[in-house]
Image (spheres, rainbow, N blue to C red):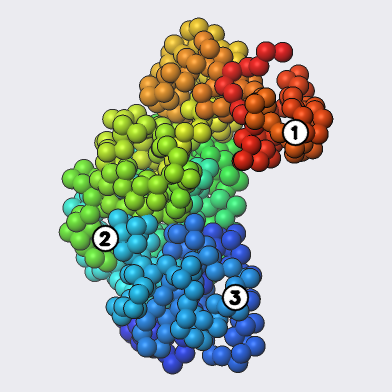
Amino acid sequence: MSFEAARQQATKEWKELQSGAVPLVYIGTATCGRSAGALRLLDAVRAELDKRKAAAQIVEVGCLGMCYAEPLVTVRKPNGTAVCYGNVTKDRAAEFVENCIVGDKPPADLVLGSIGEKSVPGVPDLFSIPALRPQVRRILRNCGSIDATNMNHYLAHGGYTGFARALQAGREKVIAELRDSGLRGRGGAGFPTWRKWQFCIDAKGDRKYIICNADEGDPGAFMNRSLLEGDPHVVLEGLLIAGFTIGASEGYIYCRAEYPLALERLRTAFGQMEKYGLLGDNILDSGFSFHVKIKEGAGAFVCGEETALIASIEGKRGMPRPRPPFPAVSGLWGKPTVINNVETLASVALILQNGAAWYAQAGTEKSRGTKTFALAGKVKCTGLIEVPFGIKLRDVVYGIGGGILNDKEFKAVQTGGPSGGCLPAAWLESPVDYESLAAAGSIVGSGGMVVMDEDNCMVDVARYFLDFTQKESCGECVPCRLGTKQMLDILKDITAGKGRPGDIELLLELAEGIKRGSLCGLGQTAPNPVLTTVKYFRSEYEAHIHEKKCPARVCKPLIHYRILTDKCKGCGLCLKNCPATAITGENKKIHVVDQSKCVKCGVCLEKCPRKFSAVECVPGAALQ
């Protein structure tokens, strides 16, 4: 069967699936859903359907992105209406099957919105709700709506037409299309994709390689994982296009071993591609041959850097090397090599499917297209989001994110992962793009975005992220190996109440030296959390150093708990629950905290009844 015939057959099967005579039930069973109990829900729904002898077709899909509402289920009825439900747990499976699949009386607390052309009375359109309204779903367009293990679903949505177009257009036109689109690498640096490919094309070499970087080492980041689990073929199509364009017959996907489901999806997709003649020798009778291998990474953050990643594939310790030469000239085994991350390759497939003009409609003049972010931290609606470049930080935090948890005060947002910058409220009106974030002292990075509120200590935040990057340093160059360690020691002293005058200036001096002298991007960006927290939250550093206080009441050596004599009723709850037996007092009499025994765990504050509010946390070390 020809590729075009296969695509037409897939489209026909998809239409038949959508117009079936029984309800269609999409259950999100990617990693996010599974962690929320989606597999248990799946089994419970099947059991309830069998119990009622009710007919329905269940389809396992990827993540829609609304992690705050997992497990997610979408039910499409034979009449064409479709409703998405959130927080559907195993305990409510019987109720859900009865009212949402068999009947039409969905519980209001489960309804998120309707999907599709047919509206549902009383139910808002899913993409009109605040968490989705500002988003522009392109890269994630299939996640949560197709079965990632069924290649026909991808083909029915235009899959591999971009690759077919590339074969027909030729290498030069592919490069021109990428140049006109304005696509910049989504791995963090934002280098123009077409230019990197052109460097590799121009480089001399009997063999060339293309590598997909799916390492995703940022803590809290899950953009690449979700895409590979929900729509692996869009990434593989981009990989095929890249291999054809630069003249590579072999490609690698470098994916961390901690992503077992993503790896499973990739291996399944490889088999399907071979079946359809899209992988192997003489693909689609074009004379182009391409083979792909998977290299499982051990989770080292530094292996996200191109040359360290190459060393790891070659079987060496993952350590960066000096550049130039750049990988596009001398990379894997000394051959010209292009390395693009998951999101970049997915964008390549979309550009070749829909055209450069379509892609450039979203974003700004210098930052075209959309970007996925893992929105986490102190926001009400956490999850995976996709927004056009140029959207304001405020629209992300308060629009998509729904605002701050418990309606507390916004304090900062960190963009760009552990080596990104922490930006205060004054930057909420700033657009999200490469240039604006760089001007603020931060980076786009691969797409982590962590929101902090009034309860976060910014000195402790800087210490936390620097602790991560210092531990992940490969140790090859002195500025990164010793400089980050020295900075971390100073931050530990400050948060422990041992800070000294001049520590802030020393931190800034070390930070600038590390940025200028480090070999790779890890060291060059590691000081960003410190530089931005000092720049925007210097008063917190000064309070820690000069007043020995933690204004946010986070750093244990700089806080103490006390019981208010005018409010304590002697109920004994704090005494009974104190793990350090640091509280004494008789029943119905005022209790006292022994500061020499107190471990600053905060249990007394947590257990004290709100009607009394007799326990308080005070910034500043207690007098012994």
Q: Which secondary structure, mark 2?
A: helix
The residue indicated by pointer 3 is 93
Number of marks in the image?
Answer: 3
Residue mark closest to the camera, 3 vs 2? 3
Q: Which secondary structure, mark 3?
A: helix
- Taking the spot 53% from the left edge, 39% from the top edge, the residue there is 301
How many residues crowd mark 1 within 10 Å: few (<14), some (14–19), many (20+)?
some
Quadrant of the rendered image containing residue 33: bottom right
Using the rendered image of the protein, determine whether residue 569 is visible from the camera's viewpoint: yes
The residue indicated by pointer 2 is 351
Observer-nearest of 31 and 6: 31
| Kind of residue indicated by mark 2 | Ile
| Dot 1 or dot 2, earlier in sequence | 2
How many residues crowd mark 3 within 10 Å: few (<14), some (14–19), many (20+)?
many
Q: Position of residue 414 (x, y in %)?
A: 42, 37
The residue indicated by pointer 1 is 570
Using the rendered image of the protein, determine whether residue 344 is visible from the camera's viewpoint: no
Q: Which secondary structure, mark 1?
A: loop
Location of residue 420 with respect to 271 vertically, above or below: above
Q: Position of residue 199 (x, y in %)?
A: 29, 44
> Looking at the rendering, in which quadrant would you find the N terminus?
bottom left
